[in-house]
Image (tube, rainbow, N blue to C red):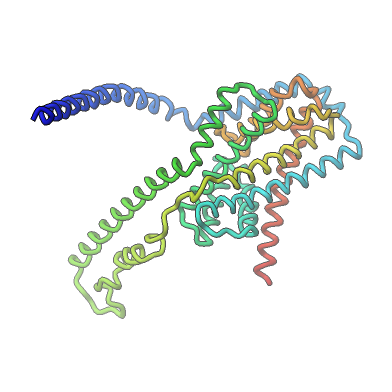
Amino acid sequence: MHCHRESNWAWAFWQERSTLDTDSIIQLRQPTMQILSSMKEWVTPIKPYLRWLILGGTLFFLLHTLRQHWQEVTTIQIEGWGWGLLAAALLVTLAAHVWAGWVWGWILEELGYDALGGWSISAYLKTNIAKYLPGNVWHFYGRVMAAKSVGVPLEGAAVSVVMEPLLMAIAALVIAFASNQRLNIGLQLMGLGVGLALVHPRVMNPLLSKIAAAKRKLASTYSESSTRSSSADSSATTPIDLPVDWTSDAASPSSALSASHASSPTSHQKPVFLKKYPILPLIGELIFLVLRGAGFIGAVIALHSVEWADVLPLLSAFSVAWMLGLVVPGAPGGIGVFEATVLALLNNSVPPGPLLGAVAFYRLVNTLAEAIGAGLAWSGDRLSTQT
């Protein structure tokens, strides 16, 4: 009896403690939600102008640097071997984009979908050029549509295009940290840790489960509304003689839509989840960044002699600049952000004139590589359809 009273007392104390904790949490949550709401109201009006502010600021910095060192830029002369290095940088950069398409196929395979290497490379190259369109999302949209066209569900395609830049950003942080570009070690380690945790199955799979549950709820709501509208239409309409009996449930357009939705493969498809930690795609993105960095270093060497001791700092600075161009909003293809970051990080390592020239040539080399890759992919698809 004594033990029973103690247990009842403990249970009552725990319930009171839980109630107090809940009330305190609610009291703390209300001002937090008010602050977030006021911040959203403040940010929403300026959000359309934010990308133009970022782009304008980076372009101003680039123009200001060019105005200060334009005389050094005009004295740059590229010799025969320099043009050879630029051509090699073009080939290496093209190979990097081809490799990235293959790695995207690996990401789809990690999610449980069969993706042929040739198809993923072709789809990647054809859509990658769209990143220069305003919004900086159209290349992702194109890949989602390309994946859907070969039977990959929308959820799997969307997760693949989210994981790809995330793994690229992680790879850039790893290279930057490993090659001595440690501007803020604490911030880099925190970003690296968050990125590595986000792609872990124990973190990613619960998020994917919540997304799938929300989709099922939305589909159920849509099916119920379609059924109600179908029954209302059938009760309000007088049957007439038609070649097809539209009054029957089987022939009703809304019922047919509901039936097709219920019996479609997508309604019973297997859930999207990571089978294991994406080590192989992460290694693939590391190789992608090294290839891209090699192309950039080739452009720098074409205009200025570089010692072996400077190779790692160049690769590190490129990785940081490329990552910022990837994650900063409002910069299609990282234009402006990448160039400004490279100039800021390498200002003391490479003279401003050759550095400006190398940045400009590398942007040209990368754009040409993407255009050539898209052209080759389109040509390959046309030849395959003709044969």
Which residue is the extreme one toward the right? 80
Along the viewing direction, whichever of 172 and 279 lies nearer the viewer: 279
- Kindly indicate the quadrant of the structure image that contains residue 87: top right
Q: Is residue 201 above or below residue 269?
A: above
Total of numbered circles in the picture? 0
In this rendering, would 245 be left or right of 347? left
Q: In this view, does 146 lie above or below 80?
A: below
The one of 338 and 201 positioned closer to us in this rendering: 201
The residue under the point 75% across, 38% down is 294
Look at 64% across and 56% down and name the residue there.
122
Q: In this view, does 63 lie to the left or right of 152?
A: right
Residue 84: x percent and y percent?
Answer: 86, 42
Q: Position of residue 317 (x, y in %)?
A: 69, 29
Residue 25 at what x, y percent from top left? 27, 25
Task: Say left or right for 245 vs 203.
Answer: left
User: In which quadrant will I find the C terminus?
Assistant: bottom right
Estimate the x, y position of residue 79 in percent, counting from the top left: 91, 36
Residue at 47% x, 28% y: name it: 46
Left or right for 59, reference 294: left
Q: Which quadrant is the N terminus positioned in?
A: top left
**Image quarter of residue 6:** top left
Kindly give the residue lying farthest to the left in the view shown: 1
Relative depth, front residue between 214 and 280: 280
Give the residue displayed 52% in from the left and 60% down from the top: 149
